[in-house]
Image (tube, rainbow, N blue to C red):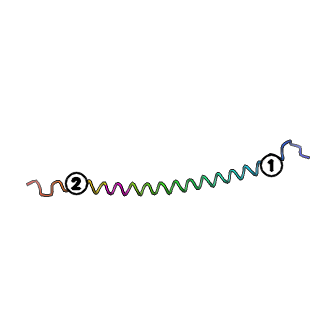
Amino acid sequence: MSVTPGAYFLSGFGVFAVLIWLTSAVACIYAFVLFVKLARRGITALDLYNYSKNLEIRAKYESANKEGPY
């Protein structure tokens, strides 16, 4: 006989709580990995966009005075 009333339910809930905690910890780690992958892709895309815009700007302003001032 148990001295604490409801100890049977609390002990079972403890195992269930640990399983929920482990599941949420794994889900958080997985979400963090996906976020890092997304951030790296975004940085790469931004680098490519900046490179193409710099080429456009350079081509526009360097070709303005090709003949020279005289």
Residue at 12% in and 57% down? 67
Q: Main secondary structure of the magenta part?
A: helix
Which region of the structure is painted magenta? 47-52
Q: Residues within 10 Å of mark 2 (few under 14, many from 20)?
A: few
| Residue type indicated by callout 2 | Lys
Q: Residues within 10 Å of mark 1 (few under 14, many from 20)?
A: few
Rendering coords of residue 47 (x, y %): 38, 56
Q: Which mark is residue 60?
A: 2
Left or right of 38? Residue 63 is: left
Residue at 53% in and 56% down? 34
Q: CA distance from mark 1 to mark 2?
A: 73 Å
Rendering coords of residue 65 (x, y %): 15, 54
Please tell me in which quadrant of the rendered image residue 62 appears.
Answer: bottom left
| Residue type indicated by callout 1 | Ser
**Which quarter of the rendering shows the C terminus?**
bottom left
Farthest left residue? 70
Left or right of 54? Residue 47 is: right
Query: Where does label 1 land, which residue?
Result: 11
Rendering coords of residue 36 (x, y %): 51, 55
